Structure formats: structure tokens, C-alpha cells
Image (cartoon, rainbow, N blue to C red):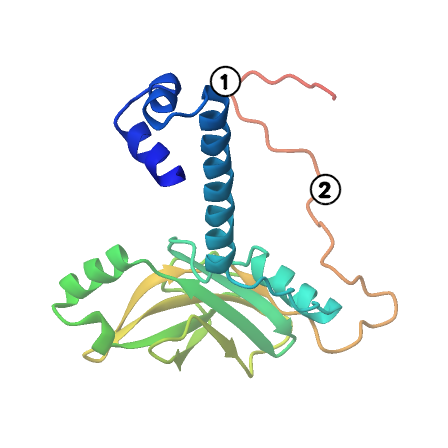
Amino acid sequence: MIDQILQLRSQYLSTAQIAKQLGLSVGQVKYQLQKARHASSQERAAAIGQEEPTRQEAPCMTQADAGQERRGREWQLPDFYGENVIRLMVQSPTVLYVYWEITWPRMRMVASYLQTDYREVQKGIRLYDVTDRYFDGGNAHGWRDFLVGEDAHSWYLPEVQPGRTYIADFGLFHQGRFCPILRSEPAATPRSWPAAWGEPLIEPVTDTGRPAWFEHFSYSFYTK
């Protein structure tokens, strides 16, 4: 009977027309339709339950695993900053440390000037002793050269003298000459011997007199 009702329903007949054709009351037709809809909804729910995979409980995460996962999401320092820079620092009275970064545009410019492949040229550090000198590139007490690796971006410079001031150049050694690319700020190594009794640890200011006044110039004193 339900099949006949559904077939007539598919022909867009009303419940009254279906009841008249099948010799049923309108209430009986509505009951059969409601029963069919309920059975259909149960079949759909059963089908969805069969398709849904079995839910598995997540494994318990230990505190060490949680810490490792959190560290993996933390921000880390980048390897490069996209700047042309060199820094010279003191590691001990007899050892300096230098690190540098050079961008590809600067590399290509130098390679074009030398007419060679930048990756095939020997890189190195030239360390100048500029103690008590206003360094102009050619008046150092002396210099030493340190050859560095192709992929190096930092280097230790050993066997320097205590109590001296140094400046480092990063550059290329090409055809018997050194071509500087980057120059650091001065770095002064500390003394390795104890100060004598009563000797100041730093050089005192010797010129404590009045400043030299210039003629035809107006001066005024002020205090903060």
C-alpha cells in the first residue's frame, strides 16, 4: 500500500485524491506518508553512521612534547638581514671576533668590477693596527690577512696584541691584490697585565684648559 501511495504522490496528487483512488480515508493516507518519512530518516542516519570513521582518542602529550612543539612555533632569529655590514668585537685580549653580511647586489657589483665570478674568488679579512691613529686607509702600524671559507660569515682572529686598536676589512684577494668591500668600526683590545699601583685604568683627559676661541664668532654660555 505504501508503494502505491508514494507512486501517486510522485504524480503530484493531493492526499484527498490519493485517498479517493485507493478507497482510504485522508487520515490513513497521512499516517502512511508519515510512517514512510520516518523510515527514510532512520535509513539515512544509519548510512551516515557507517560512513563516519571510528573516532580515535588523541594520544596523551607529555610535558616535554608540549615544550618542543611550543619551541617549534616560537620566532627565531633570521640568518640574514639583507644588509651590507661588518662588526668587529673583542673576545679576549689576544682574540678578536668578526662577522659580516654582504648582499647579492654588492657581490654582483664587485664581480662585475673584477670581471670574474664572485664565488670563485678568495675571500678574507685584512686586520689593521690603528692604535693612536686617525686611520685613512694607508697609515696603519701594520696589517695581517686572514683567509676565510667560501660560506663563512664570521671568523675568529687570534694572536692580536693586548692594549691595541684594530679595524677589519672584508674583501677579495684577486690577482695579487686585496679589494676591500666592507670596513668595520674600531675595536680596542684590553690590557693583559695588571695596572701599576695608582695607575688609572683608562687614559685621563689631559687637555682641561679653556677652549680656543675663534675671532669674528659669537659665543654664548648656557646650562641645561
Above or below residue 141? Residue 224 is: above
| Residue 209 position in % (x across, y down) | 71, 38
- For the point 71% across and 77% down, which residue is it? 192
Q: Residue visible at 69% across and 67% down? A: 61
Where is residue 74 drawn, in percent x and y?
59, 56
Task: Residue 208: give its label.
Answer: 2
Give x and y (percent) for residue 181.
32, 62
Q: Secondary structure at mark 2?
A: loop
Q: Amino acid at mark 2?
A: Thr
For label 1, the SS is loop
Q: Nearer the viewer, residue 46 or 169?
A: 46
| Separation (CA) of disc 1 from disc 2 | 24 Å
Q: Which residue of the protein is positioned furthest toward the bottom in this rendering?
A: 159
Tell me the kind of residue under disc 1.
His
Left or right of 172 in this view: 28:
right
Residue reaching furthest right? 197
Horizontal arrangement in the rendering, residue 89 relative to residue 40 (left or right): right
Task: Give the residue at mark 1.
Answer: 216
Q: Position of residue 220 (x, y in %)?
A: 64, 16
Reply above or below: 154 against 213.
below
The number of numbered discs placed on residues in the rendered structure image is 2
Q: Earlier in the sequence, mark 1 or mark 2?
A: 2
Please report the residue visible at 69 percent of the width from the left and 34 percent of the height from the top.
210
| CB contact under 8 Å: marks 1 and 2 | no
Residue at 37%, 60% in the rendered image: 182
